[in-house]
Image (spheres, rainbow, N blue to C red):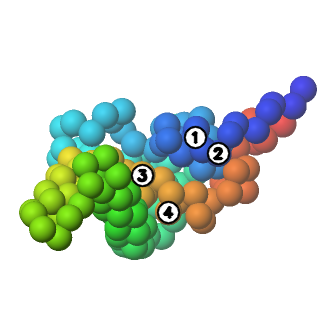
């Protein structure tokens, strides 16, 4: 009896382990309290996948977070321009920029978490990480 492979996108959005796509990557399900925002277990509770592959592994998430932030700023700016319009004759560009920055600041805790999830998914492929517990029992 073979199990079906869980879909990648829902497992990323639900912040699940990249190896088994079932275990939670973070100790707390929500972003509050903010001081525990990035607390992660040492290993996945389901498959035993190590979360920090090497010392200083998470420094690379800064690049992922930067790319996500720039993309989100661009999307917000374009959405503002499409909805309200932009003109060089008034201050609408500054309003658009302010609204975009406000959205990015409000979403920053989520962006920090999702950048860790994406970064780990780059390096750990489904079923290729640490041996799954179901395989060890067989």
Question: Percent from the top left, x then y, of residue 124?
Answer: 62, 59
Q: Is residue 103 above or below residue 60?
A: above
For the residues bearing labels 2 and 1, Cβ distance under 8 angstroms: yes
| Residue that numbered label 4 is attached to | 119
**Quadrant the N terminus occupies:** top right
| Residue that numbered label 3 is attached to | 114
Pointer 4 or 2: first along the chain: 2
Q: CA distance from mark 1 to mark 4?
A: 14 Å
Q: CA distance from mark 4 to mark 2?
A: 14 Å
Pointer 2 or 3: first along the chain: 2
Q: CA distance from mark 3 to mark 4?
A: 8 Å
Horizontal side of 65 relative to 4 (left or right) equals: left
Pointer 1 or 3: first along the chain: 1
Residue name at image x 50 percent, y 48 percent? 43
Question: Percent from the top left, x then y, of residue 44?
Answer: 53, 43
Residue name at image x 58 percent, y 38 percent? 10
Q: Secondary structure at mark 2?
A: helix
| Residue that numbered label 2 is attached to | 8
Pointer 3 or 4: first along the chain: 3
Q: CA distance from mark 1 to mark 3?
A: 11 Å
């Amino acid at each position: 009896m073979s199990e079906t492979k869980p879909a990648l996108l829902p497992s990323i959005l639900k912040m699940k382990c990249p190896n088994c796509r079932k275990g939670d990557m973070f100790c707390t399900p929500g972003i509050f309290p903010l001081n525990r925002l990035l607390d992660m277990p040492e290993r996945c509770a389901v498959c035993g996948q190590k979360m920090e592959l090497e010392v200083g592994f998470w420094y690379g998430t800064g690049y992922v977070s930067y790319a996500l932030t720039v993309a989100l700023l661009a999307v917000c700016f374009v959405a503002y321009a499409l909805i309200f319009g932009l003109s060089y004759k008034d201050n609408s560009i500054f309003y658009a920029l302010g609204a975009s920055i406000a959205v990015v600041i409000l979403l920053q805790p989520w962006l920090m978490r999702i950048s860790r999830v994406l970064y780990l998914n780059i390096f750990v492929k489904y079923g290729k990480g640490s041996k799954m517990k179901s395989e060890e029992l067989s």
